[in-house]
Each structure stands twice: as structure tokens, then as C-alpha cells.
Image: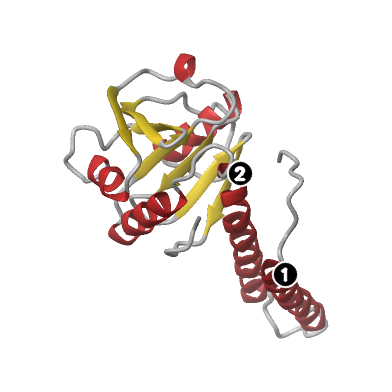
Amino acid sequence: MESHSFQLDDVIKQSLHNHLSQIAAEATKIQQHLESSDHCVLCDFEDLRKLFQSVQSTAASYYLRHYLSPYTHEYAALSLAIHSLSEKHHGALMVIERNDSVEHLIQKGIPIHAPVTSTLVETVFYPGNPLHDGAIVIRNNQIISAANVLPLSTKVLQKKLGTRHRAALGMSEQCDALILVVSEESGRISFALEGSLYPIHSSKNIL
């Protein structure tokens, strides 16, 4: 993950401290259960996994805005659109261009050149819309194009990922763009950056 000069604010620090305290308490509980021959610790490990996912999601949601803020001002529009798409389980793929041009990495779709609005983003990814299967490219505060095809990741992945997530990872492996993904199956929201995928909270205040 790239380094940034911004610091965590007090609210997010306290939230992360609380999450980490829960993780420490759960780990201690598992250690105690190991001494009991009649206790299965599999459920304990599942609880610990969920706590780790929660703390990662909280941190990723916070950092996402800071990764995007120098490159687009349309946080509210993107946040509203992603929340709505997540609730409806409408799959989506959005490339936010940063320092590196993405033009040479994609199979170009349909030019849009329109301001970013939540309504337009949701319309593009509405099931049945001819543009909904590809990715939109956002540069500054404009949607440059839609229905773009992204390069797929060739990494051997530990868990099965759908095409949208593989495309998000593949794109992030080749440039510094940040790619937002909404899962059609689960409604879960993630972002890809520098070859890694991070889950984020599905809430109206994502960004």
C-alpha cells in the first residue's frame, strides 16, 4: 500500500482500538478453550475471522476517501450511487484514474464525457442497460466512458473471484488507478489498489 502523509483522526483511532481489543479478547478466549478437551475451537476461529474482516473494512472505508480526494471531488455522488447499487445487488465496476493514464490498458467502450452524478452512475449499471457489464472510467469529476473492458488478473487467487473482481485486480496491477467494485451476488463493496482488494463498509457514508 502506498504511503500518505495524512493521519488517522480520533474517531477512527478509537474505533480501531475497540476492534483490536475485541480481537485480543477473542484470541485469549481461544487460548483458554484449547485447554478444554471437549471444546471445538472452529467456531471460535470463525468469530475471530469475522472480527478481522470488520476491522479491515473499517480501516479501508476510512482510507478510501483519502486515496481518492486528490483526484475527484465527487465523494457524495459516488458514495450515494455505490450504496444504492449495493442495496439492489446491481453489479458495478468503476475505474478512478489517478496519476497514470489508463487509456492504453483498456478495451475502450462508449464515450460519455458527462459530470459524475449518482443518478448517471446507477443508470449505467442498471441491469439490462447495454453499458452495465463493463467498467466506467472517471477522470477528475467526469465519467469519461462506459462499457470498457479491463485486463484480468493472472494471479493464482486463494478464493474464487468473479470477473469484475478479477478485472479490478488486473487493472490495479498495471497502474495506480483505484477501482471500485460492487458484487452482483452479495452486494458487497470493495476497492482494488496496487494489486490488492479491500472490502469496505456498505453504508451511505462510504466516502
Residue 103 horizontal/vertical position (percent):
45, 17
Q: Quadrant of residue 33?
A: bottom right
Q: Name the amino acid, label 2.
A: Tyr
Q: Residue at x 64, y 72 (%)?
A: 42
Task: Using residue 21 as the reference point, say whether residue 87 is left or right of it.
Answer: left
Residue 146 horizontal/vertical position (percent):
31, 30
Q: Quadrant of residue 40?
A: bottom right
Q: Residue at x 16, y 41 (%)?
A: 128
Which residue, given by chain and number where applicable, does mark 2 sit on? Answer: 67
Q: Name the amino acid, label 1.
A: Asp
In three-dimensional space, the C-alpha distance between marks 2 and 1, rounded to whole angstroms, equals 19 Å
Residue 136 visible to an observer of this rendering: no
- Of the pair 171 and 44, the residue shown nearer to us: 171
Give the label on residue 10, or none: 1
Residue 64 horizontal/vertical position (percent):
58, 50
Q: How many marks?
A: 2
